Image: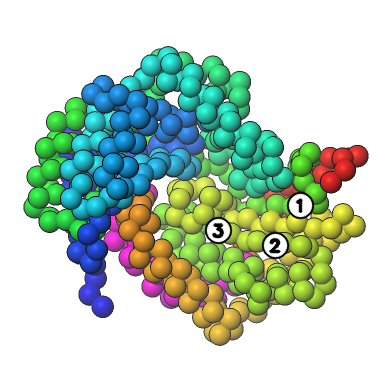
Amino acid sequence: MAAPELHRLTLDNGLRVVLAPDRTAPVVGVSVHYDVGFRSEPEGRTGFAHLFEHLMFQGSESLEKLAHFRHIQGSGGTFNGSTHPDYTDYFEVLPSAALERALFLEADRMRAPKLTRENLANQIDVVKEEIRLNVLNRPYGGFPWILLPPVLYSTFPNAHNGYGDFTDLEQASLDDCAAFFDTYYAPANAVLTVAGDFELDRARELIDKHFGDVPARPRPHRPSFAEPRPTTELRDTHTDPHAPLPALAVGYRMPDPVNELDGYLAHLVLAGVLADGDGSRLQQRLVHREPLVTDINAGAGLFGPFEARDPDTFSVTAIHAPDVTADRVLGALDEELDALASTPPGEQELAKVTARWSANLHSEHDRLVSRTLALGAFELLYGDAALAYDVADRIAAVNPEQVAEAAKGLRPDSRAVLVVKPQEGDAQ
């Protein structure tokens, strides 16, 4: 199969552009990835990157509040945005005739979002409600992505709650918003991606027309968020008032997702061998044979794969019966990791996992929205949008020895263990 068509260019103001034409359906995807996420927000302003994502939908200097929603939906399109550890993305998928509309809207808010006291107060309330709904008032809310990092990591960028603390959110000011926008929402700190049904020269003209005059600002310095790996087991306990059963999250450091990609991919495959599907090792042992847990998962990348630079987390989570101790589950996990470290998985076991990964990635990229976002994220994090197309083959090339090597690195003396306990005395 021929490699998909891909074109990259950089505007004079520093905006990087990825163009991926595909004329198979009359739709087009547009995304903008900004190189700013949870880890970039200032201390004392937890949740600020996510709050700012909300503010970017509240109108601009030339469009009133809700105009963005109206213009996209009026064209028959869909849109959204999301905040990640190392980037924030915004996207639209529309009929291809509406490409210029999407480019105008993204350029317009890149130039100047409408930052007002009313918009800020309103969006702080919206974010607080989201936190109540998704974290505070549901069983296992924030498990493990909010609760595990402060056990595994010691620095503010890596350990803090990216959803935000109510007190921090309430103290956010318009000056904070203006400074955040000026620093991080510069064209030179962003990647624009256009994928789908468009004519290349016409897209270049429209991009130049709408983004070319967005004023250039310096690209902010991105500090290293590296910190030493743990040299001992770290433990903490969290009481969850809504949890019906105890739970456990185990976190380990992984190879650098960008500079040690093959080692990182071996951890993705290891997660599949451990817990992906009924035939996986932890499912077989802990759910079916023993049975110690009601649910078990393993994952490379705390927020999913390819969403963060270094440092990133390999996690194993389990929900178990009250009469099963955390240490019993940990003991079984350690035994399975030791077995994999000393005897690499067989070719057939590995092929099942890599085939599933490959099939999932191909089916994801069949969806225009997923493909557009993947191209932008790989360009931003790796400097190479084409990796979005290559990564399935890279995963398929992971061999048994690499998986054994990954298992070898997940040691009890350098991990974080978070124990979640139901609240005593509550009728569940």
Q: Is residue 144 magenta?
A: no
Mark number, residue 165: none
Residue sitting at x 61%, y 78%: 344
Residues at discs 2 and 1 in contact (Cβ within 8 Å): no
Circles 2 and 3, Cβ within 8 Å, touching? The answer is no
Q: Nearer the viewer, residue 322 or 86?
A: 322
Q: Nearer the viewer, mark 3 or mark 1?
A: 1
Q: Position of residue 421 (x, y in %)?
A: 81, 45
User: Real-space Cα distance between discs 3 and 1?
Assistant: 19 Å
Crowding at mark 2 (Cα within 10 Å: few <14, some 14-19, many 20+)? many
* Residue picked out by circle 1: 247
Q: Amino acid at mark 2?
A: Ile
Task: Look at the image and give the residue range highlighted in magenta.
Answer: 381-407
Residue depicted at 13% across the width and 43% down the height: 206
Q: Which residue is mark 3?
A: 300
Residue identified by numbered label 2: 296
